[in-house]
Image (tube, rainbow, N blue to C red):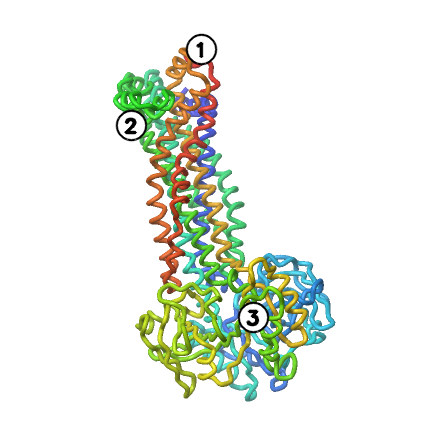
Amino acid sequence: MNGRGAARRMVRAGNRRHRLAATVVSLVVLAATAMVVLGIGLLTAADAPFERSFAEQRGAHAVIVYDPAVVSDQQLRASAMGPAVVAAAGPFDQTSLALAFAADPTILLPPAVVAGRDSPDGPVDVLHLHSGRWATAPGEIVLSLALVGPEFPVGDQLTTGSTTLTVVGLAASITDTADAWVTSGQLAQLPGEGTPTVQMLYRFREAGDAAAVTDAVAAVTADLPTRAVLGTGSYLTVMLANDRSAAAATPFVTAFAVLGIVVSVLIVANVVGGAVLAGYRHIGILKAIGFTPTQVVTVYAGRMLVPAAVGAALGLAAGNVLALPVLNQTALAYQVATVTVPVWANVAAVLALALVVGTAAVVPAARAGRLPASQALALGRAPHVNRGRWARRLLARTALPRPVSLGLGTPFARPARAAGALVAITLGATTLVLATGLATSLALVADGLTRAAQSPVRVGLAAPDRGPAGGPDPAVVEDVLRAIPGAAHVSGVVDGSAGVAGLTNSVRLTGYQGDGSWAGYRIITGRWYAGADEAVVSTNLLATTGTRLGDSIVLQVGENQRTVRIAGEFFDVGDGGLRVITDATVVTALDPDATVRQFEVGLLPGTDPQQYVSTANSRLMASGAFALYETGVDDTITLFLALIVMLVVLVTAVAALGVFNTTLLNTREQVRDIGILKAVGMTPRQTRVMVVSAVAGAGAVAGAVAIPLGMALHSQVLWAMARVAATNLPVEFTAVYHPGRLALLALAGVVIAVVGALVPAGWAARSRPAAALRAE
């Protein structure tokens, strides 16, 4: 038989004889491939998600709302024929609806812009159906994910006036063209609030910046009647908000993806390299019977690559399956269409791991292949009896039980292998420390943004042209809210915008009636404002105006000006990070037309928010006000938490497999020693303790190292996210590692080590002395 045929036979025979070793390689490569696929998929999803989905869904560069009493459908269609337009959709009739649950009319949805549209497809704004189907008949409605979120149950019934509508689907528009859709024939039968309008959706030839969009809109509307345009929305506004959200997520996603990929690559290299090194005795035999160095390399590369190929194939399938729900959640968080793992990511994962496996197998096999047969045989025996003897002697003099001291001395006999296991456990424990800190911090961020724990109920007042004549009376609404049992705080909120000296953009101005300090805003530095001459401001406003605590800023609305002193800096990432909160009298002084359009309600401990909302809506229904329960759930935070759980499970599983392989190799090399120890009286329990102790010591060291590493990564990732969001962080968001938690996390390395070693330790404990000595 020629040399190539002999090598193939040895590959097949070796994998049959060493099924367990081949299985370990397959499992490690499987988990690593799944991790790499998921990691690359996450990195891809975080790279310009809006731009990709905008192209795929043919998003609208501009949404223009027209008055149908002024302009005809024929004129609107003609507006899409100009040279500035490459595609258009519409006209679509739209109206604003007050929607309530049919099962409980007191539970309201926010006022919704509903458009009449017979298909989710079209030349512009292809709607992505998240669940269900499109509305095709009267009595059916499709809701926007931006209005209700992905957990809204398809099949529920809503009411508007005397009409009942069944929710048949949930959809997403990349440029938020509407809150809900019905058939065009259905819309005319619905009791819309205010004046009916018509929307047109345009894609322009040139729309790279705000000036280009403005010019294109002007060209489209130039030939239409005066006062035909009621409003215009640009895709740039949506893209800016989306890109800011994606950019804030990027440091988090990148950290976990890169950490997972690095862990996978290192452990695959350690497992494969360790398997080859453990085969030095077999390499010596091959050399003795005439195998050339090239044939030796071929045999061992083949023995590793065959099970690795099986693991990679299964890992590709597992990675894509695992990635699907995570990437769907990513799409929801980024408010884009479904994100999938690109084909090139699967190819890259397989090629990268094939390179790692091949290199880890070829390098030690080539080195062994160049050795004389006698030297390879000598190196393939168990570690020299004198190696690590000093460590075992020192440990024997301690008060540790003998099985523990014997186990703790094992790594010193194979320091390189022990170092590989230490790295694997350290990376797994570091991931767990990082994940625990980020999960806690992100929960605090979610609470800081929604303020749901302190202000769980929001009550909106309909616009003056809706509901009762003149709109709801804020004083009456406040009295109703205070009279409902469970209300601890009720504050009216006046919103507006104002100019600030030194800024070209206006800032969002929020005023609270009475004391607003209870509302849950997280103060970063300073304190809450104490009167109408003070305010608290967001981090980005301080940065862009060059001001600091104690300085004064001038707010201006038209000809009216008001000077307020900065009392504190609060946590906020909305409105471009440009926001001022002060007393309501400041807002009304600047804008006499401003009035309370919302109330925030804080509840007494033990009060059911849903019950309070239901009672409030039943009492406020006739007034045009509506109450909503702020749950504090955020799609982006949900995505982060899902990623944390999945990646921690994958990384720790890969790390545990690395420990399993190290322990397996150690016990096989020590089979003679274990047989002797059992022959002189070591019990199965003591044997198990000895084998586990061999990696538990490394686990304890890894846990100690992982604490500062994980804390440093946590700080870096959190502050990177904050920098992108243009905000500082309150101390409580970052100081999440309390002593009790650190004490538990320090055990993470030991837990990973013990879990990985339990199965080989059980095999060693069950082996019989005679069988162990014969196996050696």
Q: Which residue is mark 3?
A: 177
Marked residue nearer the N-terminal end (3 or 2) = 3
Q: Indicate the quadrant where residue 586 lies.
A: bottom left
Q: Answer with left or right where residue 599 lies relative to residue 709.
A: right
Q: Position of residue 404 (x, y in %)?
A: 37, 24
Q: Which mark is residue 367?
A: 2
Mark in the foreground, 3 or 2: 3
Q: How many marks?
A: 3
Marked residue nearer the N-terminal end (1 or 3) = 3
Between marks 1 and 3, how big is the CA–CA gap? 77 Å
For image coordinates 60% across by 83% down, the residue present is: 67
Circle 3 Cα neighbour tier, 10 Å, few/some/many (<14 / 14–19 / ≥20) = many
Q: Which residue occupies the foreground of this view, 261 or 651?
A: 651
Q: Position of residue 242 (x, y in %)?
A: 46, 64
Can residue 644 be seen in the rendering of this structure? yes
Is disc 1 in contact with disc 3, using a CB cutoff of under 8 Å?
Answer: no
Q: Answer with left or right where residue 238 lies relative to residue 525.
A: right
The kind of residue tagged 3 is Thr
Q: Quadrant of the C terminus?
A: top left
Q: Secondary structure at mark 3?
A: loop
For image coordinates 40% across by 56% down, the residue present is: 733
Is disc 2 in contact with disc 1, using a CB cutoff of under 8 Å?
Answer: no
Q: Secondary structure at mark 1?
A: helix
The kind of residue tagged 2 is Arg
Q: Answer with left or right where residue 215 lies relative to residue 459.
A: left
Mark in the foreground, 2 or 1: 1
Q: Which residue is mark 1?
A: 770
Marked residue nearer the N-terminal end (2 or 1) = 2
Q: Position of residue 119 (x, y in %)?
A: 64, 66
Q: Which mark is residue 523?
A: none
Q: Position of residue 348 (x, y in %)?
A: 42, 45
Between marks 2 and 1, how big is the CA–CA gap? 35 Å
